[in-house]
Amino acid sequence: MLKSEKGFRDLFDSISDLIYTQDLDGRFISVNQALSTLFGYERDEVIGRRTTDFMRPEMRPFFESDYLEPIKAKGYQEGVTVYFTKSGEERYIEYRSSLVEPNDGDPYLSGSGRDVTERVLAKREIKRLQNQILHSQKMEALGLMAGGVAHDLNNILSGIVSYPELLLMDLPSNSPLRRPIETIKEAGMRAADVVSDLLTIARGVATGKEVVNLNAIVTDYLRSLEYQKLEKTHAFVNLKVDLAPDLLNMSGSHIHIEKSLMNLVINACEAIKGSGTVGISTANRYLDEPLRGYEDVRRGEYVVLTVSDTGSGISSQDLHRIFEPFYTKKVMGRSGTGLGLAVVWNTVQDHAGYINIASNDRGTVFELYFPMTREKLPAEAKQTGLTDYIGHGEMILVVDDEERQREIACGILNKLGYRAEAVSGGEEAVQYVKQHPVDLVVLDMVMPRGMGGREAYEEIIKIRPGQKAIIASGYAKTEEVEAAQDLGAGRYIKKPYTLEKIGIAVKSELQKKEG
């Protein structure tokens, strides 16, 4: 008998699956070696303890209803549950327990289990990656839509932004018309800012990147009119700023990062009901292993911009949708457009960065991770005035398929002292340059009918090698723009045209020619 008992025990302990018996209250009567090893306890430490002693606290109340009662009612129960090992590690166990009712003893439970932790975590990771892919696809589709809408709006806004500038140049300083015309221009510029947000959502930063410092961006924002207005409307919100004195630089777009900071600070203030605190901080951070959070941040060297608040937090239902364009809890048109966080998300993506978020009922923290650079900041550019970009009769050819855009560009250039002519497409531009030398071409990049901007420039430089040009578009900067610049074209400017924007670009390119 002793020999057969030992053989049974050896067999019991040699099985790799978890084998156990329990009383009807869920206390372990016997366990095999595999179970005690997995749990990290000696066998004697497990015997006599209830299953709930090894379970997550939030699952313990369901032990009776989800485990014991079904077994007593139907004779068995199976499923997957989570147990804590002695070291605090979570293990997912797939189990099946049955009710045993012997003729000569008390009923008990007999069961087996298997560690399926790796399988469960793998499935969870696959699901997380699938959700990330779906989110990226959704953002890409919305971005394409936003880019098309922005292009059309820019064409419409050009007249509202550009004609007031031309009118103001001809009006005397005491004219009663100046104020209403300036109001029209300001309204147009605000609308152009919304279009700029749409272009950012379209996953294209319209301005070039240069070496910038987050501390300078934060300082510029805190001096801005936008922040001064926010201070007045949220007088009970206290701002705490903590900027790292040794902060490294990054390569980026100052205007887009400042806009992202502005959106985060506005949201942080509006999350606080009554009094509270909003924090802005910067830091250097080196990750020697990936950071698992809202996004997985790869290891590397980063500069981090953090905006925090002591508001009511973001619900788990909203957290995965907050970066979608037009998804907002605000009153549309009164306190927000639903584009603010979408701008943040796309700006960070365009800078090859990452976002991490922590939120609960005591507040929210947004961390923006940007890859750092050890390059130095560029020399500060001189302020330019109108006299700095006045022309001297140089011949400029404007190429644009929109009649209004041609009129506006030529009107501005003529006012600035240039001689401007216009054609309506790439083919006409090529023919014009064959017959008439020009000092510079203002070339629309997107002309759906016929030859596009990049293709037209390719043909033009065959006729006039080294022909100077600047590129204009209502879209964000694209690969076609970069291809034209690789061929020798100069600056890229984004519509709608303004006197300063087109004036500086033209003057800069002409000076290169003279040099």
Image: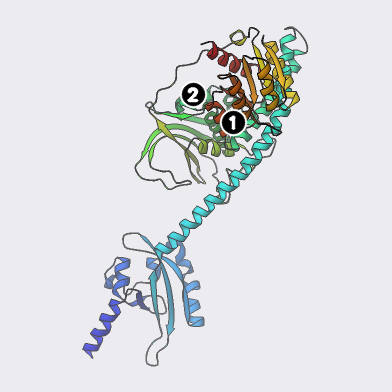
Counting from the top left corner in percent of width and height, residue 293 is at 45, 47
As drawn, the label of residue 219 is 2
Could you tell whether 107 is left or right of 182 in the image?
A: left
Residue that mark 1 sits on: 234
Mark before the other along the chain sequence, 1 or 2 = 2
- Residue at 53% across, 14% down: 512
Percent coordinates x, y for residue 178 in the rendering: 74, 13
Q: Quadrant of residue 379?
A: top left
What residue is shown at x 69% (from left), y 27% (from top)? 427
Residue pushed farthest right?
A: 176
Q: Quadrant of the image for the N terminus?
A: bottom left
The local secondary structure at tag 1 comes to loop
Tell me the distance, in whole angstroms, between the alpha carbons under discs 1 and 2.
19 Å
Residue 260 sits in which quadrant?
Answer: top right
Residue at 70% x, 32% y: name it.
450
The residue under the point 34% across, 42% down is 288
Question: Is residue 512 shown above or below 362?
Answer: above
Of residue 14 and residue 110, the one placed in the foreground of this image is 14
The answer to whether residue 321 is left or right of residue 85 is right
Which mark is in front, 1 or 2?
2
Label 1 amino acid? Answer: His
Q: Position of residue 329 (x, y in %)?
A: 64, 43
Pick the residue in front: 133 or 330: 133
Res. 452 visible in picture: yes
Toward the bottom, the furthest residue is 103
- What is the basis of the colouring in this image? rainbow
* SS at mark 2 in the image: helix
Disc ID at residue 107: none
- Estimate the x, y position of residue 442 in percent, counting from the top left: 64, 21
